[in-house]
Image (cartoon, rainbow, N blue to C red):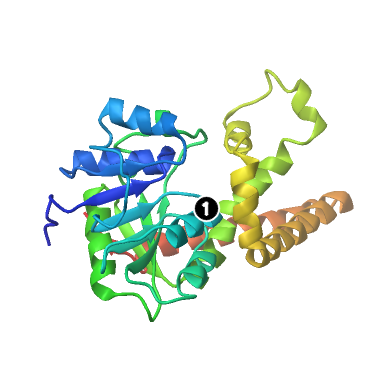
Amino acid sequence: MEVNKSLKICVAGLGLIGGSMCMALRRAGFSPAGWNRSFAPLEYALKEGAISFAAQNFDEFDVVFVALPPKAAVGFINSHAFKNGAVVADICGVKGYIEREVYKKKRNFCYVGTHPMAGKEVSTIRNACADLFDRASMVITSCAQTDAGAKELVKELTRAMGFKCIVECSAAVHDKKIAYTSQLAHIVSNAYVKDEEIVSCLGFTGGSFQDMTRIAGVDEGVWSELYLLNRENLSARIGGLVANLAEIKSALDGGSEEDLRNVLKAGRERFMQSKERAQSGVISVTNLK
């Protein structure tokens, strides 16, 4: 289904993700408007042609993407009026919290939860780009209250922005999975760089070090909010990681090469099984290309 390019779209929150959404939509032939809490990103978006104009009110738009942190996103949704039947979609890294807050009262719009699985270790709209989402996945969450037509429209816009595939699931499933695939990885990187050896490792680093430390410098203000809103899932994953590290440490301290090999082999086999499952197409996704 070809989406009408005259569809009125607004992106509220012009950071890395919101700015890139605007650019990707422009590339696809849409003319998105933009809104931001501070003026500088809005000015930059206008100057660079990422948006067609600055939004003042939101009741004129058919679709509003809310690219703000979770609590700010809920505040935005609760404090603005939207067009009857409009689609309002957040892009937050936690979905259960947003969904619960949205459905606490009757709404005149159709809510759809989304989470673009793309990003960079740097932020701000100055690092945004039209191809950020090319070949990436978009997670779309829904529940019994989700309007089917609204979800389909979001899927079509997702395709237009260049995403390779769509993963559909509940908010609860999203939050459980993202605690492992994203949030735990950030926490491991943060913990890893606290080792005192980092102050004297210049000249001893390679790809492994770069991979482990790349995301250690993210904004703690943004990520602490995400962690706390998903703390039960994340705490469980940290507990599992601690147990796995303790098992390896125990084998290492014991000095038995056979014991250590068995522990490491179990990890390698688990990884290979996961890789084979992903390549087999067992994961439920909608291929876009």
Query: In the image, what residue occupies the spot 23% across and 37% down?
Result: 52
Q: Residue 245 falls in which quadrant of the image?
A: bottom right
Crowding at dot 1, Cα within 10 Å, few <14 / some 14-19 / many 20+, comes out as some
Left/right of residue 19 with respect to residue 29 in the rendered view? right
* Amino acid identity at mark 1: Ala
**Residue 145's spot in the image, x, y percent?**
37, 79
The answer to which of 162 and 59 lies nearer the viewer is 59
Q: Nearer the viewer, residue 154 or 196?
A: 154
Residue visible at 30% across and 39% down?
Answer: 54
Q: Secondary structure at mark 1?
A: helix
Q: Residue furthest top?
A: 203
- For this orientation, the residue located farthest to the bottom is 144
Residue 132 appears in view:
no
**Residue 30 horizontal side relative to residue 150, left or right:** left
Residue topped by disc 1: 72
In the foreground, 250 or 192: 192
- Asked if 105 appears above or below 204 in the picture, the reply is below
